[in-house]
Amino acid sequence: MHILLLAMRNIARNRRRSLVTIAAVAAGLIALNLFGGYIVNTYAGLKLQAISGERLGHLTIYKRGMLLEGKLHPKRYMFDATESSRLSDIVRSAGGVKLVSPRLSISGIAAASNGRASSIFIGEAMVPEDMAILRGELQEGAGGSLSPGKNYGVAVSDDLAKLLNYKLGDTITLLSSTIDGQANALDGQIVSLFNTGNAATNDKYLLLPLTFAQNLLDTQRVERFVILLDDAALTDSKRTELGARLQSAGFDVEIKTWQELSSFYRQVRGLFDMIFSFIASIVFIIAALSIANTISMTVVERTREVGTLRALGLGKPGVVGLFATEAGWLATIGTFAGLLGTVALALVINNADLSYVPPNSSYRVALLVDLDWVRISAVSMVVIVLALAAAILPSLRAARRGIVDALAHT
């Protein structure tokens, strides 16, 4: 305890230099913690958008080969009605499954309301009743919605509706090729207009009831099954379990997680992780150099003091320990100040009602900062350890100096 108090008093002796060092450490930590909190909030938003907004669920089951060869020969890799019923029963019997939703992808041409223009569309067909379950925490209206009981109700993306002059309640004509390559057309009623959140798809995307799409494609088959679990943390273990169950039942399938299917999530996360690592490296270097500079100047100014302590019996390890303790105090106080600044600024930012338009998005999102205590604690510990390490070299230089030379220093 004596060395802790002595180190604290030594820091207080040169308050200006100590405050500058503490401020440098605190400012770097505040910037790093706020950015870390921002990307954690972004990851949570991207996860919700992928699972609920993109309707990927937690797991997606395909027949093996559907993702590659199925693009040329889709019928060969689709589940027929009997297989669909068996697969659904097997998945539900595994437990921990909230939803098993059959899906079908479709594309074709949507005709304008005046009959004089048309535009291509890409769409996804699903059971309308499944959407409310899959939506989860996603706000009402986001990502589109289908009306339960309306097997002809179609949800149309905003820009496609504007392009073809459609309004809510209008009849829309969709043309597509059947699963066997024949032309087919059906009329549907627009029950929802929505923003996909992606500028690249907001002028061509549709959501359709599964039975409507099957009639348009003239098939009773489905392309894949989307699985929503009770607990997202069980995604990997459930994939293994379901894969084993389905294989033993004679199904040759491949199961993809939502992370594997959401390339946007993976790319954004990889980019932000790299940026965070780069910024963290800069902050750590600044903190270490600031503390090393402070300790080096302190060692020079207190050379005679160190000689006196050595003459009184303080050994070389004691000198190193004293200066290392001072560095530890500087880092600890700077870290604590950075923590207080992080909490204060996070509250200000979260209550400032800030928003922005992210890349490849067609709507604004709120700018929020989460307090990621695990990351904050890890960063703080690294700063303190680096501070102790940065103090070793100047401390050793002071400890190795001869007592007589130190006492004669001016």
Image (cartoon, helix red, strand yellow):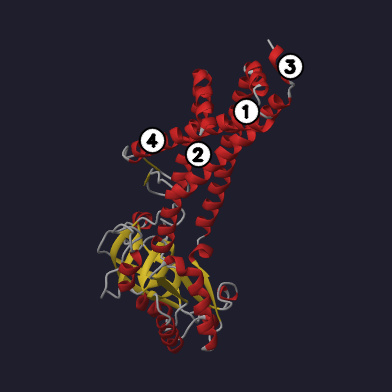
What element does badge 4 sit on?
helix
Q: Nearer the viewer, residue 402 or 362?
A: 402
Say whether marks 2 and 1 touch (CB < 8 Å).
Answer: no
Dot in front, 1 or 4: 1
On-image quarter of the C terminus: top right
Apparent side of residue 125 relative to residue 320 in the rendered image (left or right): left
Residue at figure coordinates x 49%, y 36% from the top left: 29
Disc 4 marks which amino acid?
Leu
Q: Amino acid at mark 1?
A: Ala
Does 144 sit above or below residue 34?
below
Quick one: SS at disc 2? helix
Query: Which is nearer the eye, 155 or 183?
Result: 155
What residue does disc 3 label?
Answer: 404
Residue beneath disc 1: 292
Horizontal arrangement in the rendering, residue 109 relative to residue 6 (left or right): left
3D distance between C-alphas at marks 3 and 2: 46 Å
Q: Earlier in the sequence, mark 4 or mark 3?
A: 4
List the single residue furthest toward the front.
312
Can you tell which of label 3 and label 2 is closer to the viewer?
Answer: 3
Nearer the observer, 116 or 281: 281
- The residue indicated by pointer 2 is 32
Q: Which three-letter amino acid code belongs to the residue tagged 2?
A: Leu
**Pick the front one: 182 or 396:** 396
Q: Position of residue 218 (x, y in %)?
A: 42, 82
State whether residue 161 is above or below residue 339: below
Q: CA distance from mark 4 to mark 3?
A: 51 Å
Mark 4 in CB contact with mark 3 (< 8 angstroms): no
Disc 3 from disc 1: Cα separation: 25 Å
Instruction: Tell me residue 250's x, y (percent).
Output: 54, 89
Kindly report which numbered mark, 2 or 1, lies closer to the viewer in this rendering. Answer: 1
Q: Earlier in the sequence, mark 1 or mark 4?
A: 1
Asked if residue 219 can be seen in this view, the reply is no
